[in-house]
Image (cartoon, helix red, strand yellow):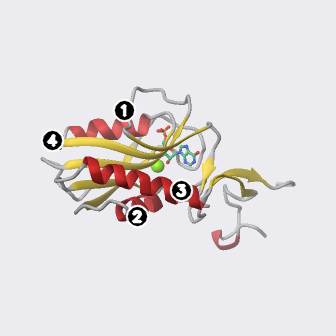
Amino acid sequence: MTSGATGGGGHPADGLLPGRVVISETELQAKVAELGGRITADYAGRIPLLVGVLKGALMFMADLARSIELPLEMDFMAVSSYGTATKTSGVVRIVKDLDADLTGRHVLIVEDIVDSGLTLSYLRKGLLARGPASLEICALLVKEGQQRVNLSVPYVGFEIPPSFVVGYGLDVAERFRNLRGIHEVAGVAGQ
Ligand code: IMP
Ligand code: MG
């Protein structure tokens, strides 16, 4: 019995376990502090509106916001491009829109990971049309060599090889978001 509270019938994450640590909690915290310092300097005299992309950016957003020493505001949106699969579909759907009016705001999109770049490219276009004073992107992770669109990401935490990773907000089939580090995904023999 591995599906537990899912009520039987199995779960897409059954048989998956966190594998090798790709980025440790300590490395994450140091990088987030560094990004926060850069953003603090770059946005001095402005009040950035951090736009977190749910759910993956949850942990990153919480830590990044606390490492920015400026008055700031936070808002969240949710998009869906993956379902429970691990390959991009190229289709992005807004599941939850922002509460804030972006007119004249200094918007900083906070995202967990850039893979093909399709999600952020779509979001960027959509948010630019709402008249922000500026719009930049901060992504914790960028997968090397995977981008299918030209996307400028001025704030990048780590460039990683293109294997699937979980933890610190990132999931596979909604699992493993609560891990403190970034891990590869491993299987269990016999599943
Ligand atoms: P993109 O549109 O291909 O750039 O995909 C970006 C989105 O896919 C991210 O916001 C994540 O939600 C998800 N994603 C891409 N790669 C991974 C991964 O390795 N682990 C978990 N989620 C991922
Ligand atoms: Mg995401």
Tag 4: amino acid = Gly
Residue 116 makes an appearance in the image: yes
Residue 77: image x %, image y %? 34, 54
**Picture residue at 43% right of the left edge, 57% below the top:** 33
Tag 3: amino acid = Leu
Out of 143 and 170, give the one closest to the viewer.
Answer: 143
Residue 118: image x %, image y %? 43, 34
Q: Which of pointers 3 and 2 lies earlier in the amino acid sequence?
A: 3
At mark 3, the secondary structure is helix
Inter-mark Cα distance, 3 to 4 = 33 Å
Inter-mark Cα distance, 3 to 1 = 22 Å
* Labelled disc at residue 62: 2
At mark 2, the secondary structure is helix
Circle 1 residues within 10 Å: few <14, some 14–19, many ≥20: few
Residue under pointer 4:
131
Inter-mark Cα distance, 1 to 4 = 19 Å
At mark 4, the secondary structure is loop
